[in-house]
Amino acid sequence: MGCDGGTIPKRHELVKGPKKVEKVDKDAELVAQWNYCTISQEILRRPIVACELGRLYNKDAVIEFLLDKSSEKALGKAASHIKSIKNVTELRLSDNPAWEGDKGNTKGDKHDDLQRARFICPVVGLEMNGRHRFCFLRCCGCVFSERALKEIKAEVCHTCGAAFQEDDVIVLNGTKEDVETLKSRMEERRLRTKLGKKAKKPKAPESVSKPGVSEESPGPSKIKTGKPEETNLDSKEKKASSAPKSAGGSY
């Protein structure tokens, strides 16, 4: 039997199978991670900060989050690890001279629109669009591509010259493995800071007293006048013994 115009439908056209799981558009995900604030979901605007796990935020959104404690439950893991403004670092980003701004991104269906980036690596010129791994230094906030740090190995920042260690390098929008590594490093760092603060706490003031000196011990005046007192007693005894002799002589 035919359906429409003598065509015979096939089995897969009549029997509906399970729906295919919709794949998340990787390009759209990259755009969201690198162009929008993790807390407010608004477009990133300077001053831009990053946390110890490598997520990007608008600084004003972080301040509002810290002031409004009720938002902590709503955001969940997105910012629960941010306890103070000291837990984020303000980024020093390098502008992309080829960036045309919002006017150049009027058509979102173009592949080129997804490749454009507002910021670039100041060393090798790679665009910060999610296609290349980027990181920042906690000590100064300067942002570089991971390739620049590997190709030009140095113990100081390529831009400002600040000295840094491996622990200061934070990968931006890294993989799950990167986030787990950064999380363990963050916990260790905070534990060291906590123990350091306890060690620096001043001890309770103790009563100041000179060692070896008690209240019953004689003062310097008593010690010094000891010998004169003995001489005075001797002189009195001599006077007493000489008095009868003088009296007997008068009779």
Image (cartoon, rainbow, N blue to C red):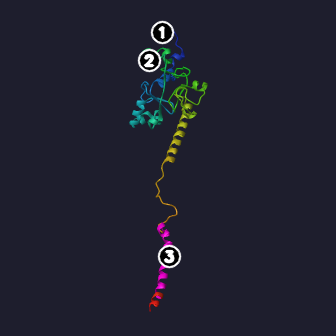
Q: Is residue 146 left or right of residue 98?
A: right
Q: Which residue is mark 3?
A: 231
Looking at the rendered structure, the kind of residue marked 3 is: Thr
Q: Nearer the viewer, residue 247 or 219?
A: 247
Mark 1 or mark 3, which has the lower sequence index? Answer: 1
From the top left corner, tell me how far across and down residue 175 is, in percent.
55, 29
Expressed as whole percent of the image width and height from the top left, the position of residue 96 reads 49, 19
Q: Residues within 10 Å of mark 3 (few under 14, many from 20)?
A: few
Q: Amino acid at mark 1?
A: Asp
Residue 242 spot, x, y in % from top left: 48, 85
The residue to which callout 2 is attached is: 101
Upstream in sequence: badge 1 or badge 2: 1
Would you say residue 228 is visible in this rendering? yes
* The quarter of the displayed image where residue 69 is located: top left
The residue tagged 1 is 4
The residue segment tinted magenta is 217-244
What residue appears at the point 42 percent right and 17 percent down from the top-left corner? Answer: 102
Magenta highlight on residue 22 = no
Q: Residues within 10 Å of mark 2 (few under 14, many from 20)?
A: few
